[in-house]
C-alpha cells in the first residue's frame, strides 16, 4: 500500500502563493474514523480567509489563538469534500469500503489532499444521481443557508426574504432554499448576475450599485446578508414586525450581541443536513453552481479569484487530476 499522497500545504499566512503542493503521509483512521479518497473538494471563502488571516472584525486575535498564531497548525487546508471510502477505523459500521460519501472536516481541515480522515459522523452517503463535484460544491454554502433559514429564522410559505449577495456560495444557496421553503425572494447583486438569480428563483433582483441596501424602501420577513456589508441597524430597518436579520458574515460584536430576531455565528456541520442538501441536488431542486478549476496546483488561482470578491457560486478542485 502506498504510504504517501499529494496534498496542499500552507506554511504561513499570506497571499495565494503561500499554498504549495507536496508529498505527505497518507493519514490513518483511528477508532470511529474513516479515510476517504477525495474525488472533489470545494475551495471556499472560508479557506481564503484562513490562508490570509483575514477574519471578520474583532475575530483576528481569537482566530489566531484557535487556528495558529504565526501559521495554521493544520497545514493541509480544505474543509469540504466528496469521495470514496478507502479505510475504516475500528468500530465504524455505518459505512463500507467503496461507499460514495461527502462531508466536512471542520477545524481539522485536510480536504485539499488526495486522502482525508474524518469521523464517520461527519459523512453522509452521496446519492448516485449527484456527482462528486456537485456534492463538494453544495455543502459549504448550503449548510450555512439551511441553518439560518430553516432552523433559526424558520422561513416558510408566504414570507418575503431579501438575500444580499445572492450569487456567491452562501447567497446562491440562500436564494434557492428560501424559494424551496415557499418564500418570495428578492436578491441583491451586480446587474450581470441578475439572469442567474432569476433562474435560481429570485422573483425580484436589485443592482447594488444603483440601489444600495440603505436606500431600499420595501420591508421583508427575513434579511439574509451573505456579504458582510449590511450593518445591524440597516438590516433591522428593513424588517417587517417579527422579522429576522441573518448576518452570515458578522463581526465579533455582532456575533456575541446577536439575540432575539438577529442571528449570527457559525453553522453546525451535521451529516443529516448534508444528506438533506444532497437529496435536493439529486432531485434537481438545488443547483450547486459549480466550476471545476483543476487539480491541487490550481489552488492559488482559485484563492486569487475568491480574493476578488466576485466569485460566482462554488469553485471545486479534483485532487487526483493530472
Image (cartoon, helix red, strand yellow):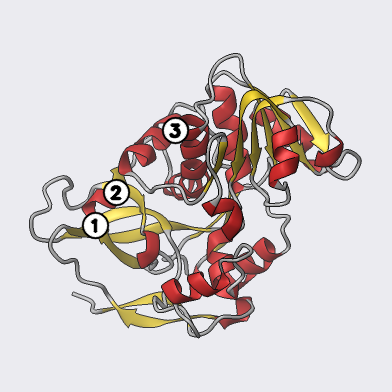
* Percent coordinates x, y for residue 137 in the rendering: 50, 48
Callouts 3 and 2 close, C-beta under 8 Å: no
Within 10 Å of disc 2 (Cα), the crowding (few <14, some 14-19, many 20+) is many
Question: Which residue carries the number 3 mark?
Answer: 151
* Percent coordinates x, y for residue 10 in the rendering: 49, 80
| Image height of 219 relative to 58, above or below | above
Kindly identify the residue that appears in the image at 23 percent across and 77 percent down.
2
Kindly identify the residue that appears in the image at 54 percent across and 30 percent down.
177
Question: Which residue carries the number 2 mark?
Answer: 123
Callouts 1 and 2 close, C-beta under 8 Å: yes
Within 10 Å of disc 1 (Cα), the crowding (few <14, some 14-19, many 20+) is some
Q: Is residue 219 visible?
A: yes
Q: Disc 1 on helix, strand or loop? A: strand
| Label 1, label 3: how far apart the Cα atoms are | 24 Å
Kindly identify the residue that appears in the image at 24 percent across and 49 percent down.
121
- Residue nearest the observer in this picture, 35 or 186: 186
- Mark 1 vs mark 3: give the one in front: 3
| Label 3, label 2: how far apart the Cα atoms are | 20 Å
- Residue nearest the observer in this picture, 231 or 297: 231
| Label 1, label 2: how far apart the Cα atoms are | 7 Å
Q: Residue furthest right?
A: 210
Amino acid at each position: 500500500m502506498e504510504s504517501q499522497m499529494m496534498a496542499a500545504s500552507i506554511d504561513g499566512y499570506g497571499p495565494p502563493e503561500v499554498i504549495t503542493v507536496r508529498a505527505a503521509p497518507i493519514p490513518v483512521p483511528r477508532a470511529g474514523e474513516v479515510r476517504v479518497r477525495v474525488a472533489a473538494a470545494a475551495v471556499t471563502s472560508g479557506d481564503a480567509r484562513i490562508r490570509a488571516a483575514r477574519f471578520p472584525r474583532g475575530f483576528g486575535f481569537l482566530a489566531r489563538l484557535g487556528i495558529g498564531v504565526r501559521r495554521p497548525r493544520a497545514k493541509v487546508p480544505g474543509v469540504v469534500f466528496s469521495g470514496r471510502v478507502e479505510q475504516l477505523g475500528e468500530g465504524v459500521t455505518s459505512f463500507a469500503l467503496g461507499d460514495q460519501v461527502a462531508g466536512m472536516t471542520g477545524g481539522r481541515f485536510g480536504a485539499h489532499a488526495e486522502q482525508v480522515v474524518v469521523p464517520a459522523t461527519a459523512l453522509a452517503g452521496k446519492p448516485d444521481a449527484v456527482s462528486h463535484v456537485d456534492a463538494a460544491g453544495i455543502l459549504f454554502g448550503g449548510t450555512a443557508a439551511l441553518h439560518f433559514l430553516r432552523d433559526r429564522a424558520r422561513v416558510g410559505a408566504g414570507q418575503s426574504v431579501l438575500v444580499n449577495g445572492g450569487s456567491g456560495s452562501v447567497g446562491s444557496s440562500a436564494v434557492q432554499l428560501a424559494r424551496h421553503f415557499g418564500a418570495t425572494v428578492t436578491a441583491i447583486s451586480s446587474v450581470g448576475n441578475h439572469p442567474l438569480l432569476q433562474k435560481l428563483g429570485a422573483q425580484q433582483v436589485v443592482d447594488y450599485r444603483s440601489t444600495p441596501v440603505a436606500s431600499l424602501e420595501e420591508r421583508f420577513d427575513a434579511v439574509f446578508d451573505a456579504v458582510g456589508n449590511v450593518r445591524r441597524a440597516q438590516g433591522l430597518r428593513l424588517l417587517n414586525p417579527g422579522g429576522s436579520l441573518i448576518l452570515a458574515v458578522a463581526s465579533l460584536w455582532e456575533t456575541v450581541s446577536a439575540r432575539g430576531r438577529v442571528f449570527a455565528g457559525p453553522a453546525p456541520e451535521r451529516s443529516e443536513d448534508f444528506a438533506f442538501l444532497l437529496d435536493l441536488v439529486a432531485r434537481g431542486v438545488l443547483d450547486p453552481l459549480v466550476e471545476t478549476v483543476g487539480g491541487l496546483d490550481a489552488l492559488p488561482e482559485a484563492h486569487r479569484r475568491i480574493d476578488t470578491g466576485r466569485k460566482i457560486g462554488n469553485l471545486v478542485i479534483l485532487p487526483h487530476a493530472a
